[in-house]
């Protein structure tokens, strides 16, 4: 039997079973007007070939149908199978263009398709976590809007005794990789994770996971945003407790717990390559990797690692679009392969720690999108993760009061924290 025949048999069987299965409905009442919804993926494929009469026998779905965009599929074929014409899809792409590029959808995106009224279509899909694009086709045109789906913050807390390796043990305890990355980054100002971590060390993390309160299945393919809020690490007699307050980590006494240079000059990134010797993916031979690489989506904002003066913001050989900042005392940072620079950024500009200087890309000699980040001291590249010089900053006045309030809240939730005093 060829495939078409099998599909047809399945179709007839399904319709047949459905008619038999529902004795309360006469054959008459199954003749329902369009729009119509097929039952299964096989039927989706067959649907376009059905005659108008055949289509009327298929029961419309009451709620939207969610379909995953598979490898090699495009929106036209996917929506075409759901009774949306090629012309309507083309109009949709144009109407949606200011909000989302429907020609560039990632494989695995979930798309909800429904038909609220005869002749109407509704298409919904996620843009970023918590952002929903909703397109409605009515009276010959599409109305496209961006909706913000409410999220709730779910707090989680995990204790961990290290037996093997931090990542392995964390994984077994259900701590997300992103939380461990943030913890390693926050602690790397004090702890050398390559050498200092030993079996028996204790880690305690508290973090918030953002979760949409509706349309959950449309966000399934996206990573929930995670925010590390509290971290404790006990290592051979040292005891570090870090509390996040307004975007930075502080010790319980209000001292800033980070270096004068950020180790992670972007948010939400994965450390994808360390400092040191390695095999170069593009050049194909071993060479010194003079920085660290972070993987994140194209366009992710890149921040100045510390206060300083922009020395370069231009094309820079194999670095592609690069920014170099002079921080004084012989320190310089370099940010390479950028897609674009912050608007108007030029040599001589003064920047503060956290100012956006550009956007992640893959310009220059780069195997894929990433940020290549270097720190130089007196002209020599050093490992950004080795910078131990702490910032001298400390919370004062109203900021210190706010921090104390937050600390009190933390303590009320956790008796182990009650011994902390700011
Ligand atoms: Zn690199």
Image (cartoon, rainbow, N blue to C red):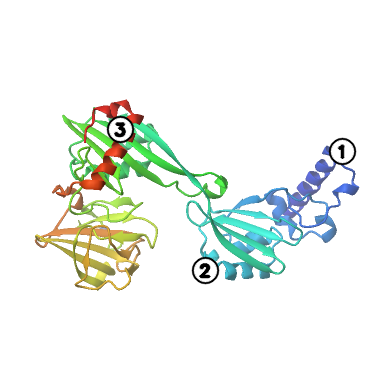
Q: Secondary structure at mark 3?
A: strand
Image location of residue 276, percent across then percent down: 19, 52
Q: Is residue 4 visible?
A: yes
Which residue bears the numbered disc 2? Answer: 98
- The mark that comes first in sequence, 2 or 1, is 1
Residue placed at 62% from the left, 50% from the top? 66
- Mark 2 vs ligand 1: CB below 8 Å: no
- The mark that comes first in sequence, 3 or 2, is 2
Residue 155 or residue 93, whichever sits in front: 155
Quadrant of the image containing the C terminus: top left
Image position of 364 (left or right of 237): right
Residue 167 or residue 36, whichever sits in front: 36
Q: Quadrant of residue 280?
A: bottom left
Of the two numbered discs 2 and 1 in the rendering, the one whose residue sits closer to the viewer: 2
Image position of 96 (left or right of 31): left
Q: Quadrant of residue 86?
A: bottom right
Q: Quadrant of residue 309?
A: bottom left
Q: Secondary structure at mark 1?
A: loop
Spatial CA distance of label 1 from label 3 is: 59 Å
Image location of residue 239, percent across then percent down: 19, 32
Which residue bears the numbered disc 1? Answer: 24
Residue placed at 82% from the left, 38% from the top? 21
Decide: is 96 above or below 409.
Answer: below
Image position of 87 (left or right of 250): right
Q: Secondary structure at mark 2?
A: loop
Which residue bears the numbered disc 3? Answer: 204
């Amino acid at each position: 039997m060829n495939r078409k025949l099998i599909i047809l048999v399945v179709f007839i069987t399904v319709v047949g079973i459905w008619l038999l299965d529902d004795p309360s409905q006469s054959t008459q009442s199954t003749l329902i007007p369009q729009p119509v919804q097929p039952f299964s993926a096989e039927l989706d494929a067959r649907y376009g070939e059905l005659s108008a009469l055949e289509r009327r026998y298929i029961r419309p779905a009451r709620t939207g149908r969610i379909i995953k965009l598979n490898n090699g599929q495009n929106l036209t074929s996917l929506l075409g199978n759901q009774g949306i014409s090629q012309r309507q899809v083309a109009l949709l792409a144009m109407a949606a263009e200011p909000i989302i590029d429907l020609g560039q959808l990632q494989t695995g995106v979930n798309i909800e398709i429904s038909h609220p009224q005869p002749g109407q279509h509704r298409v919904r899909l996620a843009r970023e976590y918590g952002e929903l694009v909703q397109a409605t086709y009515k009276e010959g045109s599409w109305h496209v809007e961006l909706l913000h789906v409410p999220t709730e913050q779910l707090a989680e807390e995990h204790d961990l005794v290290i037996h093997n390796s931090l990542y392995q043990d964390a994984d077994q305890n259900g701590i997300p990789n992103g939380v461990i990355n943030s913890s390693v980054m926050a602690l790397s100002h004090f702890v050398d994770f390559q050498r200092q971590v030993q079996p028996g060390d204790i880690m305690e993390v508290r973090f918030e996971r953002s979760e949409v309160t509706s349309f959950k299945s449309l966000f399934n393919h996206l990573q929930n945003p995670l925010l590390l809020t509290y971290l404790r690490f006990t290592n051979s007699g040292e005891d570090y407790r870090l509390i996040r307050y307004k975007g930075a980590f502080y010790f319980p006494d209000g001292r800033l717990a980070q270096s004068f240079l950020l180790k992670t000059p972007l948010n939400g990134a994965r450390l994808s390559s360390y400092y040191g010797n390695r095999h170069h993916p593009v050049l194909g031979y071993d060479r010194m990797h003079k920085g660290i690489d972070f993987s994140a989506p194209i366009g992710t904002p890149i921040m100045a690692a510390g206060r300083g003066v922009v020395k370069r913001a231009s094309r820079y050989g194999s670095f592609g679009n690069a920014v170099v900042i002079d921080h004084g005392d012989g320190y310089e940072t370099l940010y390479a392969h950028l897609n674009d620079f912050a608007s108007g950024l030029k040599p001589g500009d003064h920047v503060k720690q956290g100012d956006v200087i550009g956007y992640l890309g893959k310009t220059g000699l780069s195997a894929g999108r990433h940020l290549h980040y270097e720190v130089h001291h007196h002209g020599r590249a050093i490992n950004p993760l080795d910078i131990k010089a702490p910032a001298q900053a400390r919370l004062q006045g109203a900021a210190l009061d706010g921090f104390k309030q937050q600390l009190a809240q933390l303590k009320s939730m956790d008796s182990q924290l009650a011994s902390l005093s700011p």
